[in-house]
Structures are given as structure tokens and as C-alpha cells.
Amino acid sequence: MNRISLLSPRLANQIAAGEVVERPASVVKELLENSLDAGADRIEIDVEQGGVKLIRLRDNGSGVIKDDLALALSRHATSKIKDLDDLEAVATLGFRGEALASISSVSRLTLTSCAAGVAESWQVRAEGREMVPELQPAAHPPGTTIEMRDLFFNTPARRKFLRTEKTEFGHLEEVVKRLALSRFDVAISLRHNGRVIHQLRPASSQVELERRVASLCGPKFMENAVALDVEAAGLRLWGWVGLPTFSRSQADLQYFFVNGRSIRDKLVAHAVRQAYRDVLYNGRHPTFVLFLELNPADVDVNVHPTKHEVRFRDGRLVHDFLFRTLHRGLAEVSPADQVEAGGVSPPGLTQLDSGQPVADPVQQVQQQAMPLGFNPNPSSQPTAGQVREQIAAYAALHPAQAAVGVGQSRGIESVPSIDRNLEPTLPPESATETPPLGYAVAQLHGIYILSQNEQGLVVVDMHAAHERVVYERMKVSFAEEGITSQPLLVPQSMALSSQEADCAEEFSELFKQLGFELARMSEESLVIRQVPALLKQTDVEQLVRDVLADLRVLGDSDRVQAEMNQILATMACHGSVRANRQLTLPEMNALLRDMERTERSGQCNHGRPTWTQLDMDALDKLFLRGQ
């Protein structure tokens, strides 16, 4: 039997390095966090060969005194926490005291510092051998310079796992971006192989903040982002969220910060995904730069050595706050807001206000709202009872569509949905402004509405736009009476784990609110006696399992509502005006006015854009006018 013995300091630090130092990007993250914790407002980073050969970081922070230099390279040595109370309310980025010790164990590290108020500067070296630091005087301005060379020179097996120089620098640059977004007040420069990559000045005003975000995330993001700043229940969420039409194929433009710390959290990801639920195209990912501020005592950052994960004391409160804030922020974006901000236009076309004159408003017509597509009386809005009757009839006639969810076929005939007896009338004499989406001038191929506003030309996909209008009205009408349940003729039993069964009992009231009646039959089985009427054609057992999975992880679930919304969206799709339907000018203008009043009217139920703006400058460029 092998005897128990203490690990050597070198081996212990190299084991810790396996958790803290994965690649050059990990080194830059730890060093940047130390600089920010030291109060630096100017940081310079020099990198060679993707950070494998050299990483040099210089700051103007508070520095380290001579007596603490050697100790700084020791494991679990930190100035940021003293006792358990400090750990329970961490307000700094670093606190574990492992970074410098881990880095110095797998590289050649030199730390030079001049502490604030001290005339002398000193330097300490360590080269991953027996961790015996060498201390000597040096010349250095106030602040600290850390130079790391030859990463993993003494652990060749680890070095083999590194990727190409381009890949490693890409990860490193991403770390710098995240830290630069977390601290707008700090000037940061990054050079790679002698070439300047980023030169960021401090930002304080809103314009400067947006300029830095645009330089790091791209100007297109800022052109298609909505600014948020909401505070409630001791929480504050501010930043920018991209419009649903500005989505990406990868989740590579998502930055979320908790008290200035960049994190990746399942609870946050779920709240964001839920907020974008019925406005994002299938398989696409939203974009955002968001900052959550709360009491440090209400969040645990000591979950993982990389500090990428956090645990909220009241996760359900945080999740609900994030979802409601983002959901409301996206819903309140109207066509007027988008037109004022430059609208939406195809790639490569600018979005500038040309100030061109528009047609005389006397030539335009006054509009009335478009009713729901399957309402037999087009002059009135349907009641919640009528909607429920239509839902029941739809589910009975189209069980496949009700079970599958959203359909996107253009070939299904629609019940007439627009009043063709509208008479053109003159607008009030006081009408001096053109509506955001302007006035219709023509219909193109029975698919698009062409409209003229003050900026230029608006092109509207009439089916997509009417689909969103109908869908939003259906959701409001359906919500007036709540969820109607229907007993199962033969109760359905399901086997599951004891933990899932316990969760079902704990949240039995929530299941009743969702329209389910569940009864526990044994330690590992439930019986479903009642289900929401609208979902009787769906896979109820799988839906219950999915809801239980959400409840166990997040304490809440929106899957039932999502299933119902899918069916309503399908019905709205089938009940909207179809392609090749010829509309009159009053009908087209009625749709435009409804879009201006409807939440999320910029996207259809499947996440596709419903309209786009071509300003006069963009049109002039197409025809080379003025060149």
C-alpha cells in the first residue's frame, strides 16, 4: 500500500494550472482581472505567436510592495479576501489566489512592480522549477508589468494540445473584448506580433459607450440594437440587445456580465432564449451585450476555478426579471423606433435620413384596423369565447397541425380576412405627418406591399406582417379566460424517477395553473388525469417530463405556454392573407396601420422580417444618382 505524503509545491501548482491555465487566453484573463482589481485605468497588452511565446501586460494600478512580490507567486496568496464573510460577498474579479502561482509553474514569469507612494521598484522571477523566486531591484513607473514567456515549456504534453497561432490569438482577443466591455472606464490596447489590434480609449458618455461597443462587436450590431436600462427588486439590467432580425448562426455575439464579471450561465441563457421565443428564426441565436447588477451577497461566484459560472441566491427572481425585461424591451420596438433609428435595410445599403419630400397627404386614404383572419364579422374584434370555439374547431379538423406546431406552407387557402368594402376617405385636415410605415402605393406580385414614407420606400411582406398581427391578437384574446382543462377519458400513467415525482408533488399547484392534473401513484410513477384542452393532441407525457426538467433546474417552466403559442401561431399563419391575394389600397394601408400598433410587428411568428426600409440615399446609389 502506498503511503500518504504531501505533494511538492511545484506539482500542486501544476495540478492547479490544469484548471486555471488552459491556453494563452486563460493567462490574459487572469492577468487582466488582477490589473482591474488593482485599480488600473490604463492597460497595455503585447502578445507574440498567439501568446505562446510571449504575453506582456503593463498597467498603472496600485502595484505590489517589495515584501509581497515573492508571496504573490505562492499558491492561495491574495489581497482580496481575508475571511469567510469576504468570500460570501466577493466584489473583486479575482479572489482565489491561484492564478500567478499556476502561471509561473508552467512558464517563465517575470513580475516587476512599483507600489503607489514608493520610490523603489522591484522584480521577481520564477521559471517553473522548484518555485524559488529571485528578487532584485528594477526600474519601473508606478504600476505593474507581468511578462510570461514560453507557455508550457516544461509540460510538453500540455503544449501539444494548443492550436494554431491564429486560433489561440482568436481566443485571447475574445478575452480582451469581454474585459474591455466590462470596464468602459479603462483604456486598453492590444498588440499582436508588433501590430496594433485594439486601441480603446476610456468611455463615459453614452455616445462613447456605444462607440466602444461598436468597435468590439461591429457597427452593424449597434445599428440593430435596442438600449435597455431597467431596475426593480434590487436588480438592474442595462445594455443592448440585438433585434431578432439581427441574429447569427452561432452564439458568438453574446456578452453577459454580473457585477462586471463575464459569465456563461444556464439560467441566464434560458431567460434570454425564452424572451426571444416567438420572434427568432429557427436555429438562429440572439445577440446582446448586457450587464446585471445586484448585491454581491446574492450571487456566489466561487463555483468553478475559471469563475465563468455563478449561482444566484434567488434564481427564480433573477430569471423572471431577465425574461420580463427583455421580453418587454423587444415588444416595445415599433416601426416608428426603427425608422427613426435608420430602419432596416438589406446588407450593403446605408440607412440615412434623406429628408426627401413625400406625396401630398390629401391624396392618401384613412384606414381602419384589419380584423382577425377567421372572424366572420370583419368589422369587429373576436371575443375570447369565439377564439376558443375556433381553436377547438381547428384542433378537431387539423390534429396534425395542432400537434406539430408552426407551419410555413403558402399553399393553404385562407378564409377571407380583410374587409373589401372599405371606401377611400380623406385624412383629417390636421394630418401633417406621414405614419412611420407610410402610405401604400402598389402591390408587387401579390406578395409585397410597396409603401412611401418620409425616408423613402418601405417593402412589406404582407403575409408575414398580417400573420404577426393576427397572432398577437389571438394571444391577447386567449389569455383573457386562462387555460381550459379537459379530463382524459383514460388517465395516462407514466414512469419516472423518484426525484421527478417529488418535483411534481412540490409544484402541483403550478401544474394545476398550467391545466394539468397529476396524481402520484407510487414512488416512481404518476398518472395524468387532466390536460390543457388545446394540447390534447400533443405528446403530453413528454411535455410533462420537459416541464419537470425545467422546474428542477430553474424553478420555473414556460414549455406549456410555448406549446400553446405554437398552435396559435399555426392558426394565425393559416388565417392570414396568402400570396397572390390582390389587396386594395385601403386594405394595404389598414395592414400598415395595424403593424404600427402591434407588438413585435418587425418579425413574423417564425422570426422572418416583415418589412424593410430603403431610404432615398440607398435608392440613389442603386441608380448612381449624383455620382
Image (cartoon, rainbow, N blue to C red):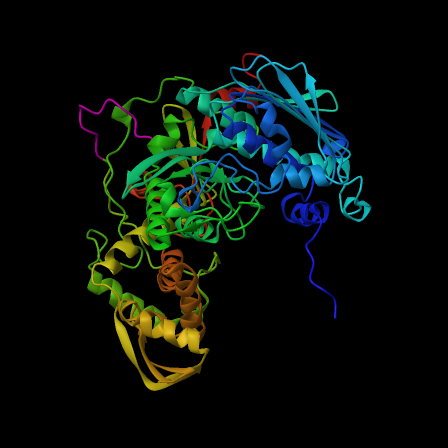
Give the percent coordinates (x, y) of residue 39.
Answer: 49, 24
Asked if one can make out residue 259 in the rendered structure from this viewpoint, the answer is yes
Q: Nearer the viewer, residue 6 or 591?
A: 6
At 21% from the left edge and 25% from the top edge, which residue is drawn?
Answer: 431
* 367 inside magenta stretch: no
SS assignment for the magenta stretch, majority: loop
Give the percent coordinates (x, y) of residue 166.
Answer: 74, 35
* 427 inside magenta stretch: yes
Quadrant that contains the C terminus? top right
Asked if one can make out residue 580 in the rendered structure from this viewpoint, the answer is no
Q: Nearer the viewer, residue 40 or 477?
A: 40
Give the percent coordinates (x, y) of residue 51.
Answer: 72, 32
Quarter of image, res 599? top left
**In the image, residue 587 above or below residue 79:** below
Q: Is residue 48 shown left or right of residue 283?
A: right
Quarter of image, res 422? top left
Quadrant that contains the N terminus? bottom right
Q: Is residue 329 shown left or right of residue 54?
A: left
Q: Which residues are magenta?
A: 425-437
Q: Nearer the viewer, residue 27 or 353?
A: 27
